[in-house]
Image (cartoon, grey):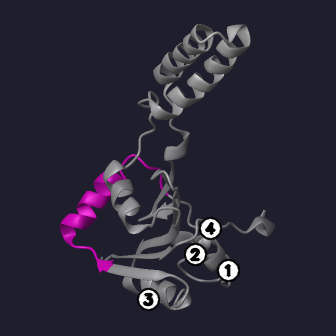
Amino acid sequence: MQLDAAIVSFHSQHGAVSAVSALPDDAPWRHEVAFIEQRHNGRVIVQGTVAGHYLDVDETDHLSEPGSAEGALTGALIGAIFGFGLPGAAFGFVLGGTVGAVRGKPTEVEAEPVTLVTKLRGAVPKGGSAVALIAAPDHVDVMLEALAGTGEPTRHTLSSPEVAALESALSSAPAASSGPTDTDAV
């Protein structure tokens, strides 16, 4: 089966969600897309379906426990040394811990398809967003037509090695839902 990849990128952080939300709910590709945001600091959030797998990647939630401890102790020491006493040490402890947690190397990193996330990062402007679809060419055609004029589209037909690499990258991600279920049939 041939797969095409399409990304429609937007310069605003919520542009992709806004553009798709404005469309009718019956589009055949709606349950096959992923939304990507790239924060101004370069960290990426990916939520949705990628090639039949559900991804929920949030690089903004990566914290460093050792960095937090080191930052807190350093901040408390600086606050105390510079004569601010206990209030300065307490402020330094909190500020240093926060900065260390964010700036330090993450200790608990979720299993994420790093190569795929890196490629998606390159397709989305900093501070921007995108909607991505990897699907049959006819679904990609319909999505690009529906989003025409709303963002900057990019399309690529995946080769067999690219499909194999994608499947490998997504092997640990759970299968995506096929869409909403009929709750009245219960």
Question: Between tags 1 and 4, which lies in front?
Answer: 4
Relative image position of residue 83 (x, y in whole percent): 64, 9
- Residue that badge 2 annotates: 30
Position of residue 100 relative to residue 158, above or below, is above
- Which of the two residues, 185 or 173, is positioned nearer the viewer here? 173
How crowded is the residue under tag 4: few (<14 C-alpha within 10 Å), some, or many (20+)? some
Question: Could you tell me how far apart the alpha carbons at marks 3 and 2 are, in whole angstroms?
Answer: 13 Å
Local secondary structure at mark 3: helix
- Which of the two residues, 182 or 142, is positioned nearer the viewer here? 142
- Residue that badge 4 annotates: 14
Q: Is residue 78 magenta?
A: no
- Residue that badge 1 annotates: 25
Q: Of label 1 and label 4, which has the lower sequence position?
A: 4
Question: Between tags 4 and 3, which lies in front?
Answer: 4
Q: What residue type is disc 1 on?
A: Asp
Q: In the drawing, what numbered circle is on residue 122?
A: none
Q: Quadrant of the C terminus?
A: bottom right
Relative image position of residue 52 (x, y in whole percent): 45, 63
Q: Of label 1 and label 2, which has the lower sequence position?
A: 1
Q: In the drawing, what numbered circle is on residue 141?
A: 3
Q: What residue type is disc 2 on?
A: Arg
Residue span colored magenta: 156-175
Local secondary structure at mark 4: loop
Q: What residue type is disc 3 on?
A: Asp
- Which of the two residues, 9 or 110, is positioned nearer the viewer here? 9
Q: Of label 1 and label 3, which has the lower sequence position?
A: 1
Tell me whether the residue at label 1 lies in contact with that at label 2, contact meaning CB atoms closer than 8 angstroms: yes
Q: Of label 2 and label 4, which has the lower sequence position?
A: 4
Q: What residue type is disc 4 on?
A: His
